[in-house]
Image (cartoon, rainbow, N blue to C red):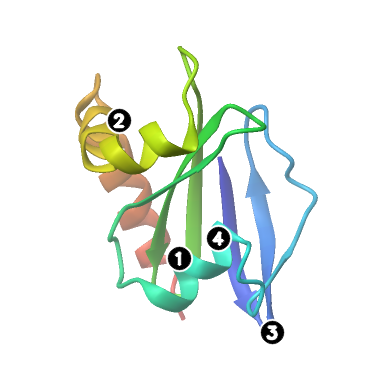
Amino acid sequence: MNRCTAKNDTLKIIHSEGDTDGDKDFKLNDESSFVATTYNNYSDEEPVLSYIESKGMFYLTSKVKEYVISYHFPEETEWSQMMFEEYNEFIIDGIINSHANALVFDYLNSILGGLQK
């Protein structure tokens, strides 16, 4: 999980947890960055799912005012970009409704929302 906040033209990593590459900041104009895309193109708390086939990883991002939170989920079976695009909505639903994830996501988003200036 990564949390980022916007400073000038960069989303700065402010916290990283678990097995993530938490040392990378994201340029707001980087169209290849799912974190920057979430910040620039989606409304608050709208879940956005991305997939990087070469890493075998799903990324669920959400913008919370000036922050973007990114959850990383390794694939459990082999996926392809085509399968991801075809089943995108089902994957989002499965991740959010699995175990207590919805409660965790809502809780973290409310904490981030309370940190706003």
Residue 95 circle label: 2
Residue 35 circle label: 4
| Label 4 with label 1: CB-CB less than 8 Å | yes
- The amino acid sitting under disc 3 is Asp
The residue under the point 24% across, 19% down is: 99
Q: CA distance from mark 4 to mark 3?
A: 13 Å
- Check the image and report above or below for 57 versus 48: above
Image quarter (top left, top right, bottom left or bottom right) of the N terminus: top right
| Label 1 with label 3: CB-CB less than 8 Å | no
Q: Of the residues under marks 2 and 4, which one precedes in the sequence?
A: 4
Q: Nearer the viewer, mark 1 or mark 3?
A: 1
Report helix, strand or loop for mark 2. helix
The residue under the point 35% across, 43% down is: 85
- Check the image and report above or below for 94 versus 50: above
Toward the viewer: 60 or 32? 32
Report helix, strand or loop for mark 1. helix
- The amino acid sitting under disc 1 is Thr
